[in-house]
Image (spheres, rainbow, N blue to C red):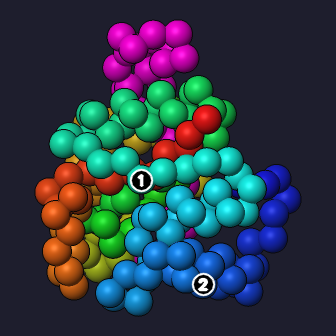
Amino acid sequence: MSPGADVSRETQLRLFNLTRSLAPAPDGAAEPEGWAKALTKLGFGGYKVSVHPSIRSAITAAAKAVRTTGRPAGLMVWRGAHSWVMSGFTASADPALTDQFTVTAVRIEDVWYPRYSNIWGRSRPPDALVPVGKLSEDFKPWKRPQARYPAKDGRYVIVIPTR
């Protein structure tokens, strides 16, 4: 999130370990709450996990948060097994000025790029503009095989900046 930031493998491992220490997942990964806590702890402002009944609801909340804070949001894709950063969006109106808007596409950053997943296919390149109608290919309702999550299962999970 910092221009010119160190993106070395060593730094990424340190950030992952921090995130995992704050909210470990049963599969050896980190919960989205760890992501939110780590961003807050590292001085990037407040972040929280937000759970929604639909893609449209999740993307609307993320766009509103991105626009009003000027900071990116996170989308828990692949049923919660992977994350994307939502760095921007296009919409029918400005979410900072009204609640009457429709998000038409989102800009995503995928840390997997340029890798290929046997399950999910090719990762998208940096700053990819993804139409909301295509998000359902990757942004699936939360369902982790290692544990039950009553507050998240079957819902769309995002990590959003707070004021």
Image quadrant occupied by the N terminus = bottom right
Q: Is residue 45 above or below residue 57?
A: below
Amino acid beneath label 2 = Asn
Residue extent of the magenta highlight:
90-116
Q: Quadrant of residue 133?
A: top left
Mark before the other along the chain sequence, 2 or 1:
2
Which type of secondary structure does the marked residue at label 1 adopt? Answer: strand
The residue labelled by disc 1 is 49
- Going 65% across and 84% down the picture, which residue do you hit? 13
Image x and y of residue 59, in percent: 36, 37
Using the numbered discs, state the Cα–Cα distance from disc 2 to disc 1 in whole angstroms.
19 Å
* Viewer can see residue 87: no
Q: Quadrant of residue 105?
A: top left
- Going 45% across and 64% down the picture, which residue do you hit? 33
Q: Which residue reaches farthest right?
A: 4
In the rendered view, does 102 fall on the left or right side of 7? left
Image x and y of residue 78, in percent: 29, 65
In-front residue for pair 50/144: 50
Image x and y of residue 134, in percent: 28, 43
- Going 42% across and 53% down the picture, which residue do you hit? 49
- Going 68% across and 47% down the picture, which residue do you hit? 45
Image x and y of residue 29, in percent: 43, 82
Which type of secondary structure does the marked residue at label 2 adopt? Answer: helix
> Which mark identifies residue 17?
2
In the rendered structure, does residue 33 fall within the stretch colored magenta? no
Image quadrant occupied by the C terminus = top right
